[in-house]
Amino acid sequence: MDEIVKAARELAVDSILIGSRGNTFTQRIRRLLVGSTSQRVVRLSPCPVTLVVPPHKPRVRSLVAWYKAAVTRSLHEHPGSLQVFKAYDVAQLFAPSRGTIGIKEVEAATLALEQLAGEGLLCCHKVKGELRYLND
């Protein structure tokens, strides 16, 4: 952290761009105990500092709600067209962040599609062993 400020002074930079790990509970405790590099740079910097925070990645429960809302929005945006949804495609197409799609995202998309089918917004069909959800 002191090296960043020192280099900024020596090079007479116009601004500093620095990342932050976010504001999770663990991060707040760590900052309380040992401090934060980004906070120290902001305090000591001779120039403006832009702090970049990673996007919030929702938990599985809120991820299900995220996918459910995204599919519902898609249905409302295209009211007259037939739409077919598969869990992996939904996870990839409506991902909350541009990170990689993993098991957690596919499971959340599956739950969202199942809930929408249970509510009557989608119909579920098995095609060649694969579940597909479509609007009726």
Image (cartoon, rainbow, N blue to C red):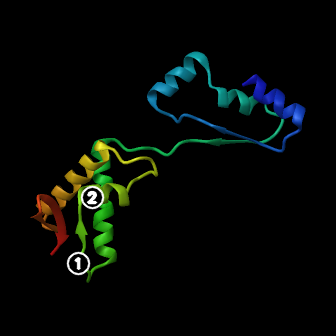
| Res 51 → quadrant | top right
Vertical comparison of 1 with 64: above or below = above
- Residue found at x 72% / y 33%: 42
Would residue 124 be seen by someone viewing this image from the given angle?
yes
Q: Is residue 100 left or right of residue 130?
A: right
Give the x, y percent position of residue 14. 83, 44
Would residue 44 be seen by someone viewing this image from the given angle?
no
| Res 53 → quadrant | top right
Give the x, y percent position of residue 2. 76, 23
| Res 121 → quadrant | bottom left
Tag nearer the camera, 1 or 2:
1
- Work out which quarter of the rendered image holds the N terminus and state it: top right
Tag 1 residue: 82
Q: Which mark is residue 68?
A: 2
- Residue found at x 16% / y 67%: 122
Q: Is residue 19 left or right of residue 93?
A: right
Secondary structure state at the residue bearing disc 2: helix
* Mark earlier in primary sequence (1, 2): 2
Q: CA distance from mark 1 to mark 2?
A: 17 Å
Q: 127 and 87: which one is in front?
A: 127
- Residue found at x 30% / y 59%: 90
Query: Which three-letter amino acid code belongs to the residue tagged 2?
Result: Lys
Q: Which mark is residue 18?
A: none
Vertical comparison of 134 with 104: above or below = below
Give the x, y percent position of residue 98. 46, 52
- Residue found at x 18% / y 70%: 134
Q: Is residue 72 left or right of residue 22?
A: left
Query: Which three-letter amino acid code belongs to the residue tagged 1?
Result: Leu
Disc 2: CA contacts within 10 A as few (<14), some (14-19) or many (>=20): many
Q: Residue furthest front?
A: 128
Secondary structure state at the residue bearing disc 1: loop
